[in-house]
Amino acid sequence: MSVIGTHVATLIAPALDSEAIERAEAILPDPARPEWLAGRIAADIPFSADGAFDQRGLTGRLRATLPDVDVVVQPSANRKKKLFLADMDSTMIEQECIDELAGYAGVKPQIAAITERAMRGEIEFEPALRQRVALLKGLPVSVVDEIIDKRITLMPGAKPLIATMKANGCYTCLVSGGFTLFTARIAKMIGFDETRSNRLVIEDGKLAGSVEEPIFGRTSKVDTLIELRDNRGLPREDTMAIGDGANDLDMIVLAGLGVAYHAKPKVAAAAATRIDHNDLTALLYVQGYGEDELVLS
């Protein structure tokens, strides 16, 4: 899909209508003819603005006017990204893996409470992870396969998102504060090129209650983005990162297009781009892909 204008506003909703388009056009400076990306789901509205305009403020006005619509405002150039980093738990899958482990260990309420506080940014990720892993000591490692097979579900749109981006030359990496026991299988299920995460210490087929150091967390995600970007000689504008928790925020801010996906309040407030209402295929429409370009198999 092509657009005319310096910038583009993408509107995405399960039942997008012409009235929503018209309300957005009334706010946008010098809007051009809208272009539908997917029938009554997503549309681009190109517009022209000088480099000094308030992109975040304009996005906020559009969201306030269209509260049930995901709205993304960005430059028209470099929309189709060449490097994509994604969080796993509650982003590419619908669960938190450590909470599922906790269910088998009989300590889910305790661990889930710590997880929630860490993802909201109320406590630091690294000590919170050590505290939670300690509560899993003695759990047979064999339960991981059962959890993946019976309790883990992929986030809707995960496979088309990765398949479509890879088909268009994007390199994809799953970056998780979770564990290799999960990320290795889940990354393969979705189709990621590689994954980086934490390694649990295992003794005699059981979890030892500790995680190998250094912990892969907030800073490690940023370092991975910089490493993969620089190794490929990509400008910042060609990168995208997505996540929902506080340990994703620095990565989201650093990426050319950083997306808070159904995120915790602190993350959603800080990120310039948010997806609150739609599934992961929204990230394809945000990049300008039309429905006929999506790889669905």
Image: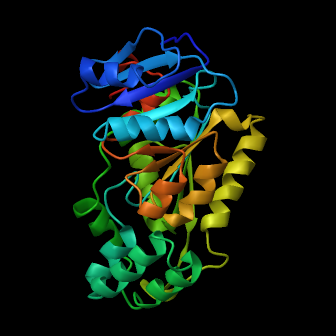
Name the image quarter holding the C terminus.
top left
In the figure, is residue 165 to the left or right of 277? right
In the figure, is residue 122 to the left or right of 262? right
In the figure, is residue 51 to the left or right of 162? right
Residue at the image position 33 percent from the left and 66 percent from the top: 145
* Residue 80 locus on image (x, y percent): 56, 26
| Furthest residue in direction front, as rendered | 26
Q: Is residue 292 above or below residue 167?
A: above
Could you say which is closer to the camera, residue 297 or residue 280?
Answer: 280
Could you say which is closer to the camera, residue 51 or residue 97?
Answer: 51
Q: Is residue 289 above or below residue 121?
A: above
Could you say which is closer to the camera, residue 288 or residue 208?
Answer: 288
Residue at the image position 45 percent from the left and 67 percent from the top: 181
In the rendered image, is residue 2 in sight?
yes
Residue at the image position 26 percent from the left and 17 percent from the top: 18
Could you say which is closer to the camera, residue 16 or residue 19?
Answer: 19
Q: In this view, does 161 lie above or below 200?
A: above
Q: In this view, does 273 lie above or below 125?
A: above
* Residue 152 locus on image (x, y percent): 29, 60
* Residue 92 locus on image (x, y percent): 40, 51
In the rendered image, is residue 201 in sight?
no
* Residue 72 locus on image (x, y percent): 47, 34
